Amino acid sequence: MWVITLDRDGLHMECVHGAEDEKPALATTDPSPLPDAVPAALRDGLNDLGATQRLTNPWLWDAITTAILRRVVRADQARKLYRKWCASYGTTVQRPCCELAVAPTPEQVLELTDDQFADIGAKLHRGALQAVATHFQRHALQWSHMDADDLVAALVSVPRIGPRTAAAAACGYTGDFAIYPHDDLAVRTWAARIAPSYPWPDKRDKGFGRLWTGWAGTDRTALHTLTLSTLTWGSHARADLEDP
């Protein structure tokens, strides 16, 4: 577990649980060189955001767990469930400010009963979490060295893990958002907020993903930048709404 703090001197990382060599990677994303095919209103809105920095998840197992718990619920519900999951069954670490908790390990997950999943509202996810825990025990080292595309393929081979969950997990771990599910509701929502006058496809229209990837063409970096910058814009917008 790494505790990240931010002050006028920048980001500070402190390892409080686990291995020092599993340090989060810091990636900078600058939307200014986006392709001309990106609508001007969207491009201008992302340029107003400016260059941003994102920390990858250094623990692949946690990235997978987070992606599974995020399925079929809103982001705020998923955050509450994840915190409850860690606090109830994970490892806790005492800090001067508070008590922190990390996700239960694959070994711990395989020992949980159906009632324990149900007690925190995660019964729906038991099958996926225990299936991937079994595979993770066998393939963790191999998976941790894969690129984003290969990691998605490996995770999809696990029963109960679909392409969207696999892609979300791979993005969190590798930081490569070129493989993000681009027709995801979050992408659609924030893109429409940034450029409300653009004629976006209807929610029932399957063409959003093709439209989005088409703007980047074969430029994988542009697709990564477009997607991650839009999601980051949304994170800032949501924080502004939640700020009392």
Image (tube, rainbow, N blue to C red):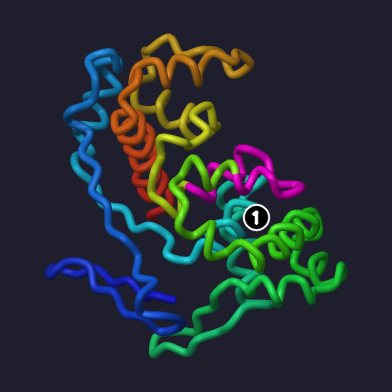
**Residue at 19%, 70% in the rendered image:** 7
**Residue at 64%, 74% in the rendered image:** 104
Instruction: Sort mark 1 into few (<14), some (14-19) or many (20+) by Cα contacts within 10 Å.
Output: many
x%, y% of residue 214?
A: 40, 15
x%, y% of residue 83?
A: 58, 68
Kind of residue sitting beneath label 1? Leu
- For the magenta stretch, what is the residue range? 154-170
User: Predominant secondary structure in magenta?
Assistant: helix
Q: Quadrant of the C terminus?
A: bottom left
On screen, residue 179 above or below 236: above
Secondary-structure class at tag 1: helix
Is residue 156 located in the magenta-colored stretch of the structure? Answer: yes
Is residue 58 located in the magenta-colored stretch of the structure? Answer: no
On screen, residue 17 above or below 141: below
Q: Which residue is mark 1?
A: 69
**Residue at 71%, 49% in the rendered image:** 158
Q: Quadrant of the N terminus?
A: bottom left
- The image shows a total of numbered marks equal to 1
Q: Is residue 118 left or right of residue 71?
A: right
Q: Of all residues shown, which one is farthest toward the top? A: 199
x%, y% of residue 132?
A: 69, 58
